[in-house]
Image (cartoon, rainbow, N blue to C red):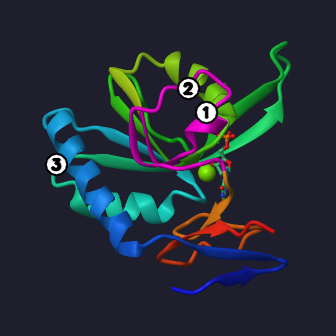
Amino acid sequence: MQTIKIYDKEFTPYITDAEIQDKIKLLAQQLKTDYADKKPLFLSVLNGSFLFTADLFKHLTIKAEVCFVKLASYKGVSSTGNVITAIGLDTNLSGRHVIILEDIIDTGKTLHHFLPQLKTQQLASLKIAVLLNKKEALAYPVQVDYACFDIPNKFVVGYGLDYDGLGRNSKDIYQLKES
Ligand code: XMP
Ligand code: MG
């Protein structure tokens, strides 16, 4: 694997396709055990999670549904500031076992502002599964229930993750090169 360049930045190889696939298989195995008879509903957060979701889903040999959503923030009238809504959420979540799928959790801000809206909907349960967990960067009280990789607080691209729109279509994950 070689260093790649996207616009002005250089990225070095970090996690290989094979390592990613191994971890995703393990996660699928765990989810199959935990959700065997629960017909879970996966909420996959676009754009970054599309490859993660597709690969995970191929290994989930239990009854499961998936819904792709885009989280969009707007300045609501609420006094708390940012409100995040899920565009494309067309499924009734009441009584469902919901698992949010994210490519990466960084500060946790996005999910922290989105979770309260899910919690009003009488879910049977709610868990969060991420491919990459930037543990040190977490600044909001968000609990990550399943993580494939714990990574340091450095910018990464590839396997769905982008730098200014590019880099998503790489099988491997790359880390921003220290300058
Ligand atoms: P928060 O801070 O809300 O951020 O947890 C989560 C979102 O920030 C983006 N993000 C990244 N995207 N490489 C990326 O390509 C990264 O290293 C990175 N860190 C955060 C991402 O969109 C994620 O959903
Ligand atoms: Mg994302």
Q: Is mark 2 within 8 Å of ligand 1?
A: yes
Residue 124 location, quadrant: top left
Neighbor class of circle 2 (other Cα within 10 Å; few <14, some 14-19, many 20+) is: some
Q: Is 153 placed above or below 112 here?
A: below
Q: Do the residues labelled 2 and 1 touch (CB within 8 Å)?
A: yes
At horizontal 81% and vertical 35% (from top left) the residue drawn is: 74
In the rendered image, which residue does mark 3 sit on? 62
Magenta region, residue range: 128-153
Residue 113: x %, y % from top left: 67, 27
In the rendered image, which residue does mark 1 sit on? 111
Mark toward the start of the polypeptide (2 vs 1)? 1
Mark toward the start of the polypeptide (1 vs 3)? 3
* Residue 69 visible in the snapshot: no
Q: Does the residue labelled 1 lie within 8 Å of ligand 1?
A: yes
For the residues carrying marks 2 and 1, which lies nearer the camera in this image? 2
Neighbor class of circle 3 (other Cα within 10 Å; few <14, some 14-19, many 20+) is: some
In front of the other: 3 or 75: 3
In the rendered image, which residue does mark 2 sit on? 142
Q: Distance between the residues labelled 1 and 3?
A: 26 Å
At label 2, the amino acid type is Val
Element class at badge 3: loop
